[in-house]
Amino acid sequence: MSDRYPGYDVMTKRNGPSWNDVTRRVIDNRLATPKGPRFFSAAEFETVRSIADRIVPQRRHDPIPVTDFVEARLLSGQGDGFRQAGVPQAGEAWRKALAALDAEAQAAHGMPFRQLSGPERDGILHRMQNGDLHHSSWGGIPPATLFTQLVARDIVFAYYSHPTAWSEIGWGGPASPRGYVRTGYDRRDPWEAAEVKDGDDAAAIRKNRRVR
C-alpha cells in the first residue's frame, strides 16, 4: 500500500467503467506471467534479480515479479524497432551484460555479481552507469549504453507495468475506454486517486478507496 495513496487499489477498477474487456484481458495475462527461469539460465535469472533488487528495491510481502516480466518481454521477441549501432539483439545483449558484470565482480571481489553485498552491487552498477568498467567481457560495447538503454530501462519498465506500481503512484491504469481529460500538470480527473499529504485527514483515504 502506498503512503501517498493509502487505501487505493487500481484493481478495484477492473469491473468498473474504466476498463473494457480488452484491457481486462491484457492485465489478466500480465498477472499470469509464469514464474522462474525460462529465457535465462538459473544463474542468469538470479543475477537479473540481484540487479533489480538494487534498481527498484521492494519491501512488500508480495513483490512485483520484475525478473519474470523482463524474461517475458525477451521471450516474446518484442523490441522497440531500433537499437544503437554495435549493440546486439536484446536477448544477446542481456546475456553479454550479465556475463560482464560477473567478470567485473570476480575481478573486484572474487565472487559472482549475485553473491555480492548490496553496497558492492551498487558500486559496480554505478560504475556501469558511468561507463567506468573496462573488462574485456563487454566486447567493445559501452557499459553505460547497456545500463541506460537495456538493463535499467527494462527493469524499470517491468516494474511500472504491474498494477501494484500503478497503485503506488495513484495511476488509474490503461485509459480504455474512459480515457483521461485533465492531463495538465497537477490536475486529475475526479475518478483518479487523490494524493494524501501531511495534515490530510482520513476522508482523503476513504475517497481513495471509493475511486472507480
Image (spheres, grey):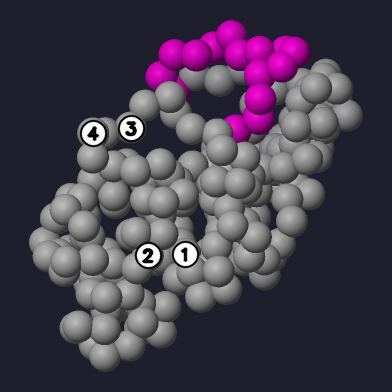
Q: Percent x, y for residue 7?
A: 71, 48
Residue ID at (41%, 59%): 95
Q: Amino acid at mark 2?
A: Leu
Tell me which label, 2 or 1, sits earlier in the chain: 1
Q: Nearer the viewer, mark 4 or mark 1?
A: 4
Residue 179 seen in the current view: yes
Label 2, label 1: how far apart the Cα atoms are: 8 Å
Residues at discs 2 and 1 in contact (Cβ within 8 Å): yes
**Earlier residue among tags 1 and 3:** 1
Position of 39 compared to 130: left or right? right
Q: From the image, tell me which residue sits under label 2.
A: 98
- Which residue is the site of mark 4? 85
Q: Secondary structure at mark 4?
A: loop
Residue drawn at the location 72% of the way across and 42% of the way down? 30
Where in the figure is residue 195, as x and y percent of width and height? Answer: 55, 37
Decide which of tag 4 and tag 1 comes sooner along the chain. 1
Which region shows up in magenta?
A: 170-186
* Residue 63 position by quadrant: bottom right
Upstream in the sequence, badge 3 or badge 2?
Answer: 3
**Residue behind mark 1:** 48
User: Which quadrant does the N terminus fall into?
Assistant: bottom right
Q: Which mark is residue 83?
A: 3
- Tell me the residue at 19%/83% (across/down): 108
